[in-house]
Image (tube, grey):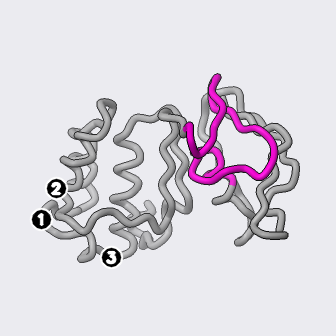
Amino acid sequence: MIEFHNVTKRYGKTAALDHLNFSISESGIYCLLGKNDTRKTTFMKLTAGYIKASEGMIAVGSSTVSTHHMPENVNFIESMATQFNMRIGDLLTMAAGLRDTFDGDFAREMAEKFGLDPHKKLKQLSLGMKAILNTILALANNAKIVLLDEPTLGFDVIMRK
């Protein structure tokens, strides 16, 4: 499903990833654990094709990943991703129009469950509510691979539960 073959990613002279060989062949829920600045986000951006590897090859399914060929079955949401500053209800409607696989009913149901006011604009939301919205958008896309970067950042104790 996901394969890294001898992948190196450099930022200038610094090797963020150095000759990484890695594979996940079975469906499941996986978690990357590591200290701050251990390049977890770099790994996810490479997997989604957001950035280019300096060396090596990345494959998702049977396709090679690059910034010119981003896999459609991968959805990556950064913890601090920003969306258009529009009303939440309009943002969900717009997202539904971008992909046939987007489950608008699920997105609206989750937004209501978590208390997202469809009339509020994105910039009016707290950090935790923005994180909830980004997670809802990611999950509603129904991609085969969902990469969430610190998805609970900003959640209060009640929302985490």
- Kind of residue sitting beneath label 3: Ser
- Residue wearing tag 3: 126
52 within the magenta span: yes
N-term mark: 1 or 2: 2
Whole-percent x and y of residue 35? Answer: 74, 69
Specify the segment rendered in magenta. Answer: 43-69
Other residues around mark 3 within 10 Å, as few (<14) / some (14–19) / many (≥20): few
Q: Please tell me whether residue 53 is drawn above or below residue 27 in the rendered image.
A: below
Other residues around mark 2 within 10 Å, as few (<14) / some (14–19) / many (≥20): some
- Residue at the image point whose x is 22% and y is 46% from the top: 109
- Residue at the image point whose x is 50% and y is 69% from the top: 153
Whole-percent x and y of residue 78? Answer: 50, 60
Image marks 1 and 2: residues in contact by CB distance under 8 Å: yes
Whole-percent x and y of residue 155? Answer: 43, 69
Marker disc for residue 89: 2
* 8 relative position to 114: left or right: right
Element type at marker 2?
A: helix
Residue sitting nearer the eye, 4 or 64 = 64
Distance of label 1 from label 2 (alpha carbons): 6 Å
N-term mark: 3 or 1: 1
